[in-house]
Image: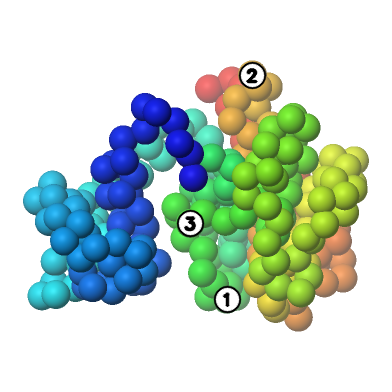
Amino acid sequence: MPTDENTITATRTSLRIVEALKRLDGAGVTAVAKDLDMTKSTVHNHLKTLEDEGYVTNEGTTYRVGLRFLELGEYKRNRMDIYEKARPEVKALAEKTGETANAAVEEHGEGVYITRAEGTEAVTVDTYAGKRVKLHCTALGKTILAELPEERVDEILDTHGLPARTENTITDREELQAELATIRERGYAYDREERLSGLRCVAAPVVPEDGGLVAALSVSGPTTRMQGDLFHTDIPELLRSAANVIEINLAYS
């Protein structure tokens, strides 16, 4: 945890409590205090302040994250050029493949989904706009890592590590570096059940000419369908084409 002398402890405590409410899917004061190893009085005071300011709601004895955060997230997202340019291409990818299509960017060393669309055959998974994931275990994330400077990649891995999500997750640094080199050469990345068992994914990078925010597009689906030419040729080609369209739109809009 950062210890910068300018850090405001009370602010960090409030944010940790908000994160706990999300992780616990809503909770009372006692549950949050136990989860964070804080006193109930401290948790109550922060929750009451957050409630008064509209950032959490109180349903009887259960506090939940409020929709005020949605307003802030939408404000941020709607000011991102990559979101406006990626949204129609993501929708088109979902329609063409029948699977789930996504776009994500890197923020604070994690991948953040900024838009997604479901095709007619899409399966239900745990992704949604705003969802944060580790970069090393997703095709989207590995695509982004492959485009970042080596120093930034090292910084991200030093901070977030390489935790295993499934038995297929890459947890060795040298193995990941080799994978990133292959992705740079090939132009797209694979997730072979590395974040969720039974789910495969292909992703391609969106690299603006002006050196702006690197993003990634992906298509994901069940392993039973994501194989053969579809997985190795068809979807990668669709992704690279969509990424190229976005890059051109970013350059000349």
Asked whether 16 or 246 is in front, the reply is 16
Q: Is residue 57 above or below residue 142?
A: below
Q: Is residue 105 visible?
A: yes
Q: Quadrant of residue 31?
A: bottom left
Alpha carbon separation for disc pair 1 and 2? 36 Å
Q: Is residue 125 above or below residue 252?
A: below
Q: Residue at x 82, y 72 (%)?
A: 227
Asked whether 85 or 107 is in front, the reply is 107
Q: Which residue is mark 1?
A: 123
The x, y position of residue 231, in whole percent, is 81, 65
Q: Which residue is mark 3?
A: 131
Alpha carbon separation for disc pair 3 and 2? 27 Å
Q: Residue at x 37, y 33 (%)?
A: 7
Q: Residues within 10 Å of mark 1 (few under 14, many from 20)?
A: some
Q: Which residue is mark 2?
A: 210
User: In the displayed structure, does residue 41 sit left or right of residue 102?
Assistant: left
Three-letter amino acid code at disc 3? Answer: Lys
Q: Residue at x 85, y 40 (%)?
A: 184
Three-letter amino acid code at disc 2? Answer: Asp
Q: Are marks 1 and 2 in contact (CB under 8 Å)?
A: no
Counting residues from the start of the chain, the first of labels 3 and 2 encountered is 3
User: In the displayed structure, does residue 142 sit left or right of residue 104?
Assistant: right
Asked whether 190 or 164 is in front, the reply is 164
Disc 1, SS: loop
User: In the displayed structure, does residue 15 sit left or right of residue 185?
Assistant: left
Counting residues from the start of the chain, the first of labels 3 and 1 encountered is 1
Three-letter amino acid code at disc 1? Answer: Val
Q: Residues within 10 Å of mark 3 (few under 14, many from 20)?
A: some
Q: Residues within 10 Å of mark 2 (few under 14, many from 20)?
A: few
Colour approach in the figure:
rainbow
Q: Nearer the viewer, mark 3 or mark 2?
A: 3
